[in-house]
Amino acid sequence: MNDPLNIPGAGDPDAPAVMATAVELRVVMGLLRRKLREQANVGDLTPSQIAVLRRLDGGPATVTALAKAEGVRSQSMGATVAALEAAGLVMGSPDPADGRQTLWDLTPACRERVRVGRALHEDWLFRAMRARLTATERAELGRAIDLLKRLVADAPNGGAS
């Protein structure tokens, strides 16, 4: 396993530049996430609640599955889900595979909220790109997105080369 504090590829003359780019990309992605969050009002939701809503956007899940996915105890996840249910954002139904379990899913109102939030994100990005980037720069950004997709694509060796 690589030591995250050491630059991998010591002896590779490109390694410092690649590491600098990796750091800069991480920072810029964080800034972009924050900027997008500002555009779609998430109200009083905690980061944990937002994470659960994102998971449930992929389909229903039990509290146990959500807890495992988020790396928390089932009791903690139960409290998070209860708060989301009280806010009218999630609803439970019996698990057809195990009637003792409850499958949690987004409510129609929450799905609409997610849809509107995504539209706000996309609208902000569209307006910012049109206002701040030239046509050539927008084309470059499109090519950069293709590169980012390659970075996150599943690879047999975990993405490392």
Image: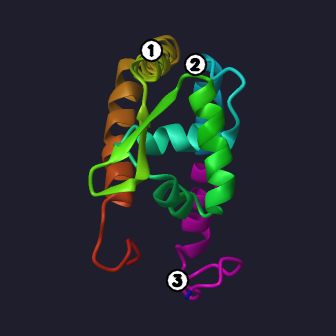
| Cα separation between marks 3 and 1 | 46 Å
- Classed neighbour count for the residue bearing mark 3: other residues with Cα under 10 Å, few (<14), some (14–19), many (≥20): few
Taking the magenta stretch, the answer to whether it contains residue 60 is no
Specify the farthest residue to the front.
100
Q: Which residue is mark 1?
A: 116
- Residue behind mark 3: 12
- The magenta region covers 2-26
Q: Which residue is mark 2?
A: 40
Q: In the image, residue 131 lies at what x, y percent?
A: 50, 11
Colouring:
rainbow
Query: How many labels were placed on the picture?
Result: 3
- Dot 2 falls on a residue whose secondary structure is loop
Answer with left or right where residue 145 lies relative to residue 16: left
* Residue type marked 1: Val
* Amino acid type of the residue tagged 3 in the rendering: Asp
Q: Does residue 20 show up magenta in the picture?
A: yes
Q: Residue at x 59, y 37 (%)?
A: 50
Q: Are marks 1 and 2 in contact (CB under 8 Å)?
A: yes
